[in-house]
Image (cartoon, helix red, strand yellow):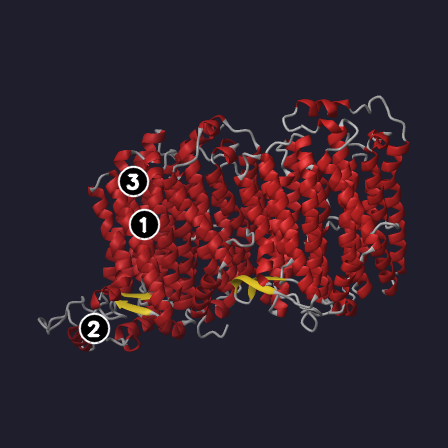
Amino acid sequence: MTTLLILALLLPVAGSALVLLLRRNPNAREAASLVTAGALFAVVFSIYQAVMRGERPAVVLAEPFPGVPIVLEAEPLGVLFALIASFLWIVTTAYAIGYMRGHHEENQTRFYTFFAFAIASTMGVAFAGNLFTLFVFYEVLSLTTFPLVTHAGTDAARRAGRVYLGILFSTSIVFQLLAIIWVYVLAGTLDFTPGGILEGRASAGMAPLLLGLFVFGIGKAAVMPFHRWLPAAMVAPTPVSALLHAVAVVKAGVFAVLKVTVYIFGTGFVTATAASVWLMWVAAATIILGSLVAFRKDNLKARLAYSTVSQLSYVVLGAMLANALGVIGSGMHIAMHAFGKITLFFCAGAIMVATHRTEVSQLDGLGRKMPLTFAAFLIGTLSIVGLPPAGGAWSKWFLGIGALEAGQVGLVAVLMLSSLLSLAYLMEIPLRGFFGRATEEGDPQPGHEDRAHGPDGGHGDHGFHGAPRWSLAAILVTAAACIALFIHPDPFYRLMTLVTAP
Amino acid sequence: MIPVAANPLAQSLAAQLQIAQNLVSHYNYWVVIVLMMVGFHILIARGNLIRKIVGLNVFQTSVFMLYISLGKISGGTPPILAGGVGHGETDAHGAAEGAHQAAEVLYSNPLPHVLILTAIVVGIATTSVGLALAVRIREAYGTIEEEEINAIEAEAGA
Amino acid sequence: MISEHLPILQVVIPLLAAPLCIFLRGRAAWGLAALASGSALAISLALLGRVLSTGAISYALGDWAPPVGIEYRVDAVNAWVLVIVSTIGAVVGPYALLSVEREIEARRIPLFYAAWLLCLSGLLGMAVTGDVFNVFVFLEISSLSAYALIALGRDRRALTSAFRYLVMGSVGATFIVIGIGLLYSMTGSLNMADLSELLPGVWDTRTVRVAYGFLAVGFCLKLALFPLHLWLPNAYTFAPSAVTAFMASTATKVAVYMLLRFFLTVFGAAFSFDVMRLDLVLLPLALAAIVSMSLVAIFQENVKRLLAYSSVAQIGYMILGLSFASATGLTATLLHLFNHALMKGALFMALGCVMYRIGSVRIEAMAGLGRRMPITMAAFVAGGLSLVGVPLTVGFVSKWYLIVGALERGWWPVAALVLLTSAMALVYVWRVVEAAYFRQASAGARRSGEAPWSLLAPTWALVLLNLYFGIDAMRTAEVARVAAELLLAGTGR
């Protein structure tokens, strides 16, 4: 069992080595990516089965400091995150093949190599057995995604990279590391322990400050005012935005927040000290402000980015509620939002490759030319907003009653207001697509031309009205998953109940 | 070996320094301090590299004076063994013998002088490295005035 | 047989090899120097192993028993420092060959290696000796040779920097002699162990306190503690690359060790912390060094100077650890001695590779180097991340202990400040990385290729050590902890 854990970490690394080896042959290179992704999912799935059997496999990789090892351990919350990330890696790889070729991106080998490294670090985050390990892989994730964000190599990419690494590193070094070492000094350990390790060791006055250091120090959770890196990272190719900035990186952030709340502080300690009340309102403010900013963005990817900022704070909010329902809602929202948002990003990328359009106002009438893509966008929207028949409905439901149970009626109002806002800014896209009137400027000819003389652009058969085949397949899979998760959210729900009632 | 706590030299030195609270009676310290300040002043205030080296020398000399005057014990004779010559002072036995005799005859302490010989050698080495540098600076810049060198560098940098 | 004489061999081998170098020609001189440096490493490792297993070694020089004779005394603290110095010596030794041939006139090369070995033996001697006056002698051996080494830099400003260093260094050394003389006048002894027993009896005298002050100023000049650091940036900037790599990783480290040895062993930790309140004196200076020098580093255009200012800031970290007056703080200090030597050594050696190929280390000259010299720049990035303190590098290990130390004292603003300055380190490292990877190559960089392997291999050896001891800090942390407890022995801290 423990070998599986190590395998989960090493498989993506091996995958990136394979990608490098096969760089002369793009088809074999992409096949290597796909095979590794599939194998990784299989590995994670068997870990999932073991965890559901009640096993908690753990393995110590190294011990840098006395008493502070680098240790991998599979527990329900981590398995949930790993399942999502590894499954979506397969889908994203398929999508990326279509996108990268259709978009004639340069340095594709570097892209796939670092992509696999980023997944390896994500696995490390998911299976981190103590706070130190989590921190290590968190930082490695920032580093390995940096070349992906700056993939274009332009001045804009460089500036974005600076913001990205600047915010993620400085928050993690200044706040998070301080908090981690503080916990270590207080508790003498950093192990994730059900029920937390701080009860009786940290004073009630200190707890709110310490928790705040974590919430702001985990910059990847994009709680305002440390959210700027996420919109900045949108200069990256769309598959990167999709997987990393809708799934792996941001989810690593909120996952860390949830994990710290549950396994370091312990929900009991958080509620007893009321440490999280002020942070609930910070999260609520981020939810509303993120939605408002998203409203004003005409650029599709920027709008989705701010939507992500807003949605991430749902997860943070659920963690801060620190009751069983809130934590369950929080964990399930990690899953539901991942599938919903990746669908939206996939669609945005497909639109961009097919038509070279990036602004919402340019989308009028496109839905009739790309019906599948826009239909998928609609499903993704429903999931994000939290409407049936999409999976997002469940997580919003749990978060809502979690807030009620915590006696925070104001927060319920915030959740509802934000749902309305997100409905408004996301629905605009499919509405324009299906019902808007196509303009002359909207003739997607340039995209067609580009593809005609591109070396990799052999997919001319789908014409201007379609996304690349590989990409379209990926979109359909994730959109279908959104609906499937409404019908059958059981696996994720069961995992989360294991977290709250071990 | 000589138990230093019981070393009469150390004891007398300590006693002497008790009296040294009254600095007026210890003009040697005043000489040291004046020399030190003069040297330091030249070192800082003068822009000419040779003068700086001279200042450094004066500064170091003050320390030589400090050490040499430390070795002097009121009423002590020069540290040459009185009697018992040919006892083979190099071995440990001889040293113990010497200590025994020191109780009878009061010697000035030779060790500071030995130490300062080393320091003087070091001072000469420092001076020669400094002078060599000054020569090469003169070759490179055509001057050994600090201000002119700075002006040349500022010009080159601009 | 020979193992008994390890403490003296540590110093004597490079010391004797030095004059021999003068009679050899170019590469032969280098061979001898590299050999002597390598053997110094072997000896220091053997010494550390023996000290850790059997306790302190006392070696009576010329069989004259201490305290009258000169004693060489090796315990966990200075064995550790010996390993640091000789490791850097052994790594930079092979590296020097090509770097020095490129940067120094052929006829001066044997002299260069002679001065190099003298400097090495001086530094090792300071670390190994248990006699305070001997410290002064070795200090001057290393300093005088260092002035000469720096003056060998290609830029004529190397001469003025060396002169300035000579003046400030000599003043510092003279202060130290004064301090030593005053101590002798009070106790009649020059042996460290002996002094540590005699001094408590005369703690209350003004003379001892004046001696303390002179020694403090002298050592702080030597270790370049802000604001006594003015000699350092220019000296490091204009010295030959190999010299910068060696000096930055060793000279200030030994000076820090001397400070620890004098104030914690000779005077005693109780005297330093309880009577003289050394901790409260050093704390503001250390913080000022860390913050101001990190800021200054951000605005430098010459990368060597940038790293030099960063060194002054990093020395601040070491002194900060000392100012915590606790075992954890001292562990952090001792760890950072080693860790900082590894990272700055790696960084300056990577810069030496750049210097070798394109003849400049200004940021604009390094534009586009990420593609031209990928292996060199990867080493620079790794060293830079270590400097910032990213996990799995040695920089993180030091930072960890430093912050634990600060929090143990309840000084969380200090901990926050340390972390904030790490973020500043990120800024100055990143300026170089951005230039190398995102800007168009300059004319010089476009022509250049990767540096030769004989430069890259030692550079990467240090980089790998950075990573290895970042992942497995158990051994280094253990030695540092033992040494720290030794320094604080008997004070119950």
Horizontal and vertical percent position of residue C321: 51, 61
Q: Is residue A172 left or right of residue C342?
A: right
The image quadrant of residue C86 is: bottom left
Do marks 2 and 1 both belong to one polypeptide chain?
Answer: no
Relative to A43, say whether A103 is above or below: above
Q: Earlier in the sequence, mark 3 or mark 2?
A: 2
Horizontal and vertical percent position of residue B37: 38, 51
Q: Quadrant of the C terminus of chain A?
A: bottom right
- Number of residue marks: 3
Amino acid type at circle 1 is Cys
Residue position for label 3: B131
Q: Tell me the subunit letter for badge 3.
A: B
Residue B27 seen in the figure = no
Horizontal and vertical percent position of residue A283: 79, 54
Residue position for label 1: C119
Residue closest to the eye, A376 or C205? A376
Residue position for label 2: B106
